[in-house]
Amino acid sequence: MKKRALVIKNLLFIINIIIFCYLIFVGRNQYLYNMNYFKCILFMLINCLFVYTYGILINEEKIYKNNVLAYIFLFILLLISFTFFIGRTSLAFYTWGYAGQYTPFYTIMRQIKYGSTALLLKNIVGNIVMLIPLSFLLMIKNLKNKNILRQSVIIIPTIIIIEVLQAFAHTGSFDIDDIILNYMGVVVFTFLITRFKIIDKVRKLFYTDFKLKLRHKKVLFYISLTVLIVTDIVIFIN
């Protein structure tokens, strides 16, 4: 059973990564298949659910840890699609833009003063929550990452790389306020989830089989497998 489940899990995982890359990164496929933010998030969540049920089925420490690495990989892929491809113009060399982009809180204050509600939600709230999933997964991977300084070694370079590449690739612009909002979201989230010891309780959910019977584990695994396949088919049909 373990070998068969491993083959199914690895095969479907690889196939779905290829499918996602095809839909998002190849030509204008993201527009042909209407791959918006919601569809991308749903696609990745269903893949995570499939990986998660595989962990429950096998119930081994090594598998649980590998699953967390898979979640991180899927999130990074999603992050790349959001920041460089979905709703973006074609990649092209770009100049650095206006001086206000290097002045802390300049863009934030302008958007609060002149921006619409939709703009505020997209640019301010969106930037605040953008890297929270990565912060969460780092803590799930290792409780030592509850320390914000340990997270910062990964989070801050990630933010800066995204901003620089967005500017050069003409899929956005380098803005110091984006860096501030990204990092502020991670700091506040980490403080809250550790201050109230939420992460300790949530983390256990990623390292347990809930004492389910084997037949129930199999049912969950094959249900998630079916949902994953159906989702792929629906996306291609639509």
Image (cartoon, grey):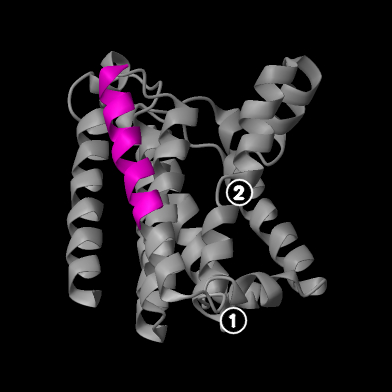
Mark 2 or mark 1: which is in front?
1
Q: Residues within 10 Å of mark 1 (few under 14, many from 20)?
A: few
- Can residue 71 be seen at all in this image of the molecule? no
Give the main secondary structure of the magenta stretch: helix
Magenta residues (range): 222-238
Q: Is residue 135 left or right of residue 43?
A: right
Q: How many marks?
A: 2
Q: Mark 1 — residue? A: 143
Q: Residues within 10 Å of mark 2 (few under 14, many from 20)?
A: many
**Quadrant of the frame with the C terminus:** top left
At 36% from the left and 76% from the top, the residue drawn is: 58
Question: x and y percent of residue 168 in the render?
Answer: 33, 34
Q: Nearer the viewer, residue 123 or 113?
A: 123
Q: Is residue 233 magenta?
A: yes
Instruction: Give the secondary structure at mark 2.
Output: helix
Question: x and y percent of residue 33 in the render?
Answer: 30, 19
Q: Mark 2 — residue? A: 182
Q: Earlier in the sequence, mark 2 or mark 1?
A: 1
Question: x and y percent of residue 167 in the render?
Answer: 39, 34
Which amino acid type is shown beneath numbered disc 2? Asn
At 78% from the left and 25% from the top, the residue drawn is: 112
Quarter of the rendering containing residue 191? bottom right
Which amino acid type is shown beneath numbered disc 1? Leu
At 64% from the left and 57% from the top, the residue drawn is: 186
Q: Nearer the viewer, residue 106 or 178?
A: 178
